[in-house]
Amino acid sequence: MDLNKKNLSCDLLIAGGGIGGLVAAVEAKENNPDLDVLIVEKQFTGYGGKANKGGGVLQYFQLDKITPMDFLKFHVNEIGGYLGDQELMLKYVEMNHELLQKMDAWGIVMPRNEEGNYFMMPTGPFTCMISVDLDLCLKMRRVAEKLGVRIIDKVTVTDFVVKDNTICGAFAYSILEEDNTFYTISAKQVVIATGSQNYRVGAMWSSGRGDGIAAAYRAGVEMRNPEFGNFSQLIRVGSHGEVVFGENFMYNAKNEHVTENFTDHRQTDICSLAIREWYVNMVNGTGPIHLDYGPDKRDVKAVNQDWQRPYGQRFRECRQEFTNQFDNDLEVVPLLIGEQSCIKVDHDMATSVKGLYAIGDASYCGSCAPGAVPAPPARNRGSGILNAVFAGVLCGRAAAAAETVAPAEITEAETDACIEKTYAPLYKEEGHNAKEVIELIQQAMCPSEYSVYMKADRMDEAEKLVKQAKELAADLKAVDLHDLLACHEAEAMVLSAEMHFFASRARKESRGWFLREDYPEMDNENWLKWIILKNVDGEMTLSTEDVPIEKYPIQLPKKD
Amino acid sequence: MIYTNHKIEFDPDKCVGCQLCYKACFVDVIRWNYEAKKPIFKYVEDCEHCFYCQSVCKRDAIKVLPDPSSERLHQHFERYE
């Protein structure tokens, strides 16, 4: 199988053609039409990613009834545990209607009723969700192509090239045998839009395999908040279908309502205390847990039909036929979603490397916007897509306005070295299968008592599995390009799990979503800090940054 | 191992070769046979039962038959008993 080598160059390279990458490309082009923008997507731009596989909902703020500060106050106190960048969260809320207007102008369908208002569903005391049809990425692809954005599909970005802490491009390879091309891409600026780390567990989230995060880490980019990559969601045991609005209705085998007093309002997403309740009941012999909505049952199906989304409706009907077949009762279990999104970025979505940005689910927690809670949808239903749009807009504007110079040259020798490293698993006679590694990482990350309700001795058990996985990952064999991609994704999963446990051990407290049985209290004296991880000469180093709470509008609660 | 046991039923007579199923698969299960102008369900063991290929097919040529029992949740049920 002969390898083709191709050199490309562009002003702005975007790794990942999901909703975030597409928005960044379009926003950059609209602000600077002369910019040569290239999207490189591992699967198909317009179809790949997660935005088009979910509920098709967008977070909506009724800004005529609440102020952005109302929501911020609620979020900081009830969800984010004072660990958020309040300025960035405030900006996200303030831009809510502007972002929706942009999406409207790009042709994205957000259904409205006869009066011309969005169909709205409350999802908390200060927030609603509205619907969006699931062809949103296809619509964005058409807009991008019309503006002259170049797109290459079925090609995965494997490494970023950084010299003097400045980006100069990336390496990428085709996953199709009939193409079999290795790309050296010279770029003045690069955007990482490759999603979060989801450990290949939940169906909708299966494309988030952390490869962009791993490539950034290898290139020396700083990571922030990696311990908030352990989101879990209740699923039905029969179909493995996700449960929405389930947290307040959890009953144990004795028919005791175990989450009776959780919140006084229905929330779409679960909090980690409910996961803890599931675990505690299971170990105490009062499991399994089932849901009983009682007379207050909300018919989510009916709401979906009201929402008039022709593209999304067909997708939901295919799933519904299947879930009806398998869900005989409402027994539920937590499923790890992960959502590690730890690339550290500033308010322009710029990373610690000059000219390199990270957006959407690659950098949600790294941006610090949410505080002590994993990436969307973690407790902010509909914020996944909108955060990606928000980050794409900020990044696209910044990239369009940036003063750039020609990037440093990527030498032939550097290309050859990356080719040798990238394809090495294909040329091995013997070695381990990527799936052996992924299996071990899933065993370490998925059990709720390992990654959500943590304790030092249980993390010892999990880290032994990560160590085993790392040993196997050092000797991987691939049989074809699909398998080679799995090898690289497996390596990324090992790194993500290592970062999760390294940072989780250090954070000796409980805060927001983050729960430790051995340190159950929030410790503002010692841990009002963000954890930073960085690759220094192959070693994972840990440092901390103080949260500048004194400059934010919402302060810590006063001590008694 | 993380292989799943989902099945994909495909009716080649209904297929018009539009490639949408191939493009829709976000985990590279489906490849394309350019000579036959039909999909190849090459890595079915990696199917995540997302139903996207089935839902984009305008000719109803594809039906995903999931087997949820082949998807492991990795919770320690055996320890809790």
Image: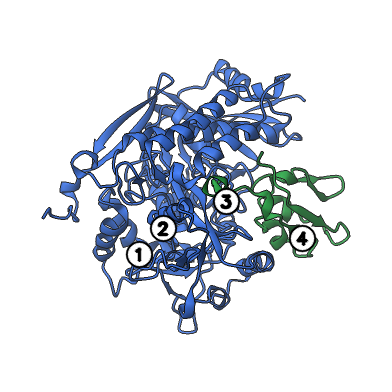
Chain colours: A blue, B green
Residue under numbered circle 3 = A202
Find the residue positioned furthest to the top.
A413
Residue under numbered circle 4 = B63
The amino acid type of the residue labelled 3 equals Gly
CB within 8 Å, label 2 to label 4: no
Between circles 1 and 3, the one closer to the viewer is: 1
| Real-space CA distance between mark 1 and mark 2, rounded to the nearest whole angstrom | 8 Å
Between circles 3 and 2, the one closer to the viewer is: 2
CB within 8 Å, label 1 to label 2: yes
Residue under numbered circle 2 = A274
Q: Are marks 3 and 2 on the same chain?
A: yes
Whether A264 is drawn above or below A486: the answer is below
Q: How many marks?
A: 4
Tag 3 subunit: A
Q: Considering the numbered disc 1 on the image, is that residue within a helix, a strand or a loop?
A: loop
Whether A453 is drawn above or below B55: the answer is above
The amino acid type of the residue labelled 4 equals Lys
The amino acid type of the residue labelled 1 equals Phe
